[in-house]
């Protein structure tokens, strides 16, 4: 089996899965590298090259879970060490105001996405939210690549218009708008 060819063919799909499993791109990148290393070392255990993607994804998920377990224990170990030193902890996380603003922005983005026509929303969700490739999106929606690109362009433009309109404050008119 040609490990390099298999890795090139399947690493992007496995990376997208790992983003969802790990929760962020940085961890997913680290986990993918570790999973590829483990897969290379254990290549003799793989019976069929057709199973490489699922095998690599499984290795990646295990590495991600191990990382999350370590990260979950780290604050407890740090807290224990700080208690022994008599250190008081400052409040963690964003303020309540920041949390409220984030929730409002998420709700606004959700409404903006829901305002799109179905065909544009489907393309936008697959390309920009699920991060599928252009050809993969076109195949999944059974449309041409050109149609997919056109719908994506319209979706992004409509989202920009929706968000611009929603975020413009009457107290702060935009350049070129008329004041009464």
Image: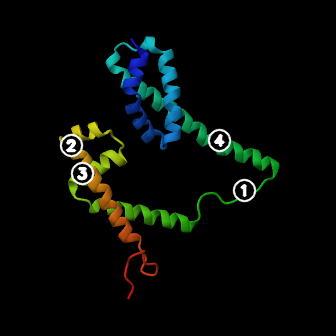
Mark 1 element type: loop
Q: Nearer the viewer, residue 75 or 143?
A: 143
Residue pointed to by mark 3: 151
Q: Give coordinates of residue 37: x percent, y percent.
A: 52, 21
Label 4 packing within 10 angstroms: few (<14), some (14-19), many (20+): few
Residue pointed to by mark 2: 141
In screen coordinates, is 19 left or right of 89? left
Mark 2 element type: helix
Whichever of callouts 4 and 1 sits on the residue coming sooner in the sequence is 4
Residue at image point 38% right, 67% down: 164
Q: Do callouts 4 and 1 mark residues in contact (Cβ within 8 Å)?
A: no
Q: Do callouts 1 and 2 mark residues in contact (Cβ within 8 Å)?
A: no
Mark 4 element type: helix
**From the viewer's perspective, is residue 17 above or below residue 167?**
above
Residue at image point 38% right, 26% down: 10
Residue pointed to by mark 1: 89
Residue pointed to by mark 4: 74
Residue at image point 33% right, 60% down: 159
In screen coordinates, is 72 left or right of 102? right
Q: Mark 4 or 3, which is nearer the eye?
A: 3
Whichever of callouts 3 and 2 sits on the residue coming sooner in the sequence is 2
């Amino acid at each position: 089996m040609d490990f390099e060819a298999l890795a090139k063919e399947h690493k992007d799909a496995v990376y997208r899965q790992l983003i969802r499993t790990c929760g962020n791109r940085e961890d997913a990148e680290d986990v993918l590298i570790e999973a590829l290393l483990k897969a290379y070392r254990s290549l003799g255990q793989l019976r069929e090259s057709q199973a490489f993607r699922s095998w690599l994804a499984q290795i990646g998920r295990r590495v991600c879970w191990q990382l999350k377990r370590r990260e979950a224990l780290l604050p407890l170990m740090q807290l224990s060490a700080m208690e022994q030193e008599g250190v008081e902890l400052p409040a963690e996380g964003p303020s309540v105001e920041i949390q409220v603003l984030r929730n409002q922005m998420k709700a606004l983005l959700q409404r903006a996405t829901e305002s799109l026509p179905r065909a544009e929303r489907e393309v936008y969700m697959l390309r920009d939210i699920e991060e599928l490739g252009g050809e993969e999106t076109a195949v999944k929606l059974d449309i041409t690549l050109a149609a997919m690109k056109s719908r994506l362009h319209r979706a992004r433009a409509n989202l920009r218009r929706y968000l611009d309109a929603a975020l413009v404050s009457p107290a702060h008119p935009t350049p070129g708008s008329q004041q009464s």
